[in-house]
Image (spheres, rainbow, N blue to C red):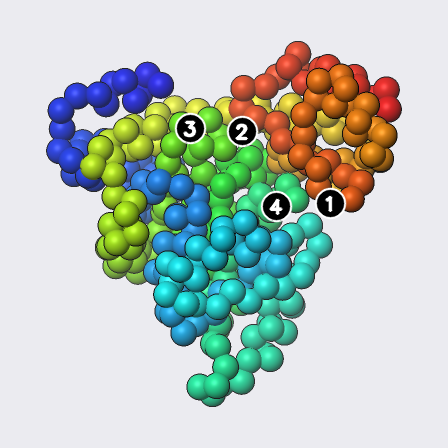
Amino acid sequence: MAAIAAADRADHGYDGDAWSARLDDAFSALFETPVQALWIASGTAANSIALACLCPAYGGVIAHEEAHIVVDECGAPGFFTHGATLMPLPGVGAKLTPDAVRDRLKAIRPDVHQVPARAISITNATEYGLVYTPQEVAALGDVAKAHGLGLHMDGARFANAVAHLGCAPADVTWRAGVDALTFGCVKNGGMIGEALLFFGPQARDRAAEARRWRKRSGHLFSKGRYLAAQLLAMIEDDLWLRNANAANAAAQILAKEAGNRLMHPVEANELFVRLTAEEAATLRAQGFGFHDWGHGAARLVTNWSQDEATVAPLAAALARL
């Protein structure tokens, strides 16, 4: 909020302001390589614009069948790409595996009658809160490189993934073959806006194309400095990582009490907990609100502002079930 207030003065409009001009250098320092960085209004727009820069309208994007771009973006990737096809695959914990991707690629005939794959999209942390390691990303990056595909990472919870891994951001992105990253801000404490980052020798050209898509889609804010100011405040003193560590730590406190109710290992800040209808009603009667996840499960998400004292009541309630 202080960064937003500090940006509340006259400057150039759109992305010609002093804050937006600092994004490339700031993210380049964080990722230890030249980066092209753009602020984008939302995660859906960032994911879709990234894919529009990696995949032509006649191409396909390989993704997990429960990926956000497949399930929760209302067809936005197809809208932004002007018709590219999503190619969903199964996988434990919403993770893609190199073997599954290779098998899908082998099944595509090299003629004009079938959609050719042109990109792979993965989510880190995944929709079930699991984290791709640098080695896992690199294995997919090798497949992408061998087949001439772009590799996109939906990083709505990228900070939580890095906090869990304890690695450098570079290790799980461009060093592992990632071409484009949606760097989450809002789910990690920001007010509005995300960052879209491009790596590698094509970064400048892809960023130029992304700027066209941003304008064409109505997402070029006339006062973009307010988005840029948030992103700078988030990364320049490692606030993004401190916030993610806090959210992850809070999740671990709940995970300990959830015990064998957990459907998946807790590696980031999401928990999927088995509950009967009666148990869910008991928790709600105590004032706890949560999202029902299919039959007999609840999805719990901790955030950057929570600590042991904040989650202690829910932890105790889970232990009593």
Q: Earlier in the sequence, mark 4 or mark 3?
A: 4
Q: Secondary structure at mark 1?
A: loop
Q: Earlier in the sequence, mark 2 or mark 1?
A: 2
Q: From the image, tell me which residue sits under label 3.
A: 190
Q: Secondary structure at mark 3?
A: loop
Disc 4 vs disc 2: which is toward the camera? Answer: 4
Q: Are marks 4 and 1 in contact (CB under 8 Å)?
A: no
CA separation in Å, label 2 and label 1: 27 Å
Position in image of residue 191 (x %, y %):
40, 27
Q: Judge from the rendering whether residue 123 lies leftward or rightward of residue 197; answer left or right.
A: right
- Camera sees residue 236: no
Q: From the image, tell me which residue sits under label 2.
A: 244
Position in image of residue 309 (x %, y %):
66, 12
Q: Earlier in the sequence, mark 4 or mark 1?
A: 4
Amino acid bearing label 4: Glu
Disc 2 vs disc 3: which is toward the camera? Answer: 3
Front-lying residue, 142 or 6: 6
Q: Which mark is residue 294?
A: 1
Q: Are marks 2 and 1 in contact (CB under 8 Å)?
A: no
Q: From the image, tell me which residue sits under label 4.
A: 127
Residue drawn at x 61%, y 46% is 127
Residue drawn at x 84%, y 35% is 276
Q: Earlier in the sequence, mark 3 or mark 1?
A: 3
